[in-house]
Image (spheres, rainbow, N blue to C red):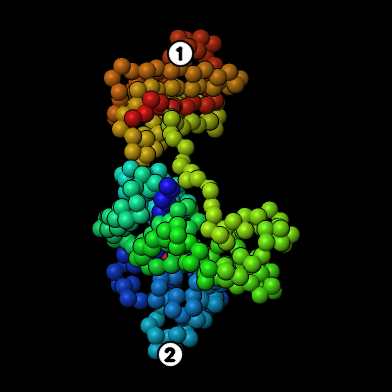
Amino acid sequence: MRIIAHIDMDAFFAMIEERDNPHFKGKPLVVGADPKNGKGRGVVSTANYLARKFGIYSAMPISQAWQLAKEAQKQGQKECIFIQPDIEKYKRVSDKIEKILRNYPTRIEKASIDEFYLDLSFAKNYKEAQNLCKKIKEEIKQKEKLTCSVGIGPNKLIAKIASQLDKPDGLKVVRPKEVSRILNPLPARILPGVGPKTEEVLVKLKIRTIKDLKKLSESQLKKLFGKFGEELYKKARGIDPTPIIEKREIKSIGAQITFLKDTLNPKIIFEEFQKLVNKTFYEFKENGFTSFKTIVITVRFFDFETKSHEKSFPVPLTSKKALLSKGMNMLLPFLDKRKNPKKKLIRLIGVRIKNLK
Ligand code: TTP
Ligand code: MG
């Protein structure tokens, strides 16, 4: 039996900003383009739940959001705060949440900056899966001071729909036998892939809910929407065989650089090499690795002749210092007659570590 969970952070960008700016607490907040007093031209990234009460949503023109906020204020509501997004910060938070999830013994697919699928099929039953998700929610709340909504179901489609049904801070379980009862009354647009265009076609046929959608046969849907029609037929019935796709396993980590000008100047080469080592080691740490056994140094000469030198060490290496000194020792011979007898200028250098733990 498959049991899949979908985790979706609540009002993600907005909640992070509320957390980091305590004076935003209790106020409507819109994260998006600069509204420029109503003349701004971008869109809303997201709004917190207080601002959503004014009818402000993701992807709405920021000028419209500004108008809605002003009207609400006229009617005695609190002034809405508008701020611009700091995507790099949100990515860092997203990585931290991913790290929390990766401590659980589940296969994980990161589906976007704020959503993840977890394969909980190892759980004995839905109750056990639900308890595990409760724990995950608590850990995210405690460590990141953010809430999320979780949906649990027999496949990714049901899990994703379920996570939206109990937002914010929700936990919704849809067991296989409940699928059609829960899907039937929902608007057809809740199905992934049904955008405004598909919805327009459906509304013309007086199809609003998933129950309505199920009245169309597979061939009718195919005629209307082509290949997507076949998928839609399955989706309306809660069928979704798509697997959890984990990020490919990382086998090696490295970096390389092409010099602005071919060179044999040791100062320039070592300076750049140090940067490559910093970058490689940062990524190594970020991905949760603790040791490596093999270093590969690559050198490309001005004439594109490319040589690499690979060396494995009996004792695993763990520090940046070790990577720098061992790597440097491997790089040096390419600068003198040992591995560069014709003293050819160097065009590119690279470093890579393998046998990661
Ligand atoms: P969502 O998960 O769609 O929205 P959300 O997390 O803000 O709110 P909800 O509680 O309903 O899940 O998107 C995650 C983030 O992605 C969102 O915080 C901002 C960003 N985003 C955009 O920048 N533009 C968009 O059109 C959407 C939908 C999201
Ligand atoms: Mg979200």
- Residue 15: percent from left, percent from top: 36, 65
Give the residue type that dot 1 points to.
Asp
> Does 82 sit left or right of 132 as displayed?
right
Q: Residue 8 versus residue 288: which sits nearer the camera?
A: 8
Q: Is residue 279 visible?
A: yes
Q: Nearer the viewer, residue 99 or 273?
A: 99
Q: Position of residue 85 (x, y in %)?
A: 45, 62
Q: Is mark 2 within 8 Å of ligand 1?
A: no
**Residue 258 left/right relative to 312:** right
**Who's the residue at 43% across and 22% down the image?**
296
Q: Residue 314, how many percent across, how many down?
A: 31, 16
Q: Nearer the viewer, residue 279 or 162?
A: 162
Which numbered circle lies on residue 2?
A: none
Q: Earlier in the sequence, mark 1 or mark 2?
A: 2
Q: Does 91 appear above or below 353?
A: below
* CA distance separating discs 1 and 2: 78 Å
Labelled disc at residue 336: 1
Residue at 49% across, 26% down: 349
Q: Secondary structure at mark 2?
A: loop
Which residue of the protein is positioned furthest toward the front in this rendering?
Answer: 177
Task: Report the residue at 41% width, 71% height from top.
Answer: 48
Q: How many residues crowd around disc 2 within 10 Å: few (fewer than 14), some, or many (20 or more)?
A: few
Q: Nearer the viewer, residue 192 or 15?
A: 192
* Kind of element beneath mark 1: loop
- Whether residue 31 is visible to the viewer of this picture, yes or no, is no
| Left or right of 213 in this view: 38 | left
Q: Which residue is mark 2?
A: 75
Residue pushed farthest right?
A: 223
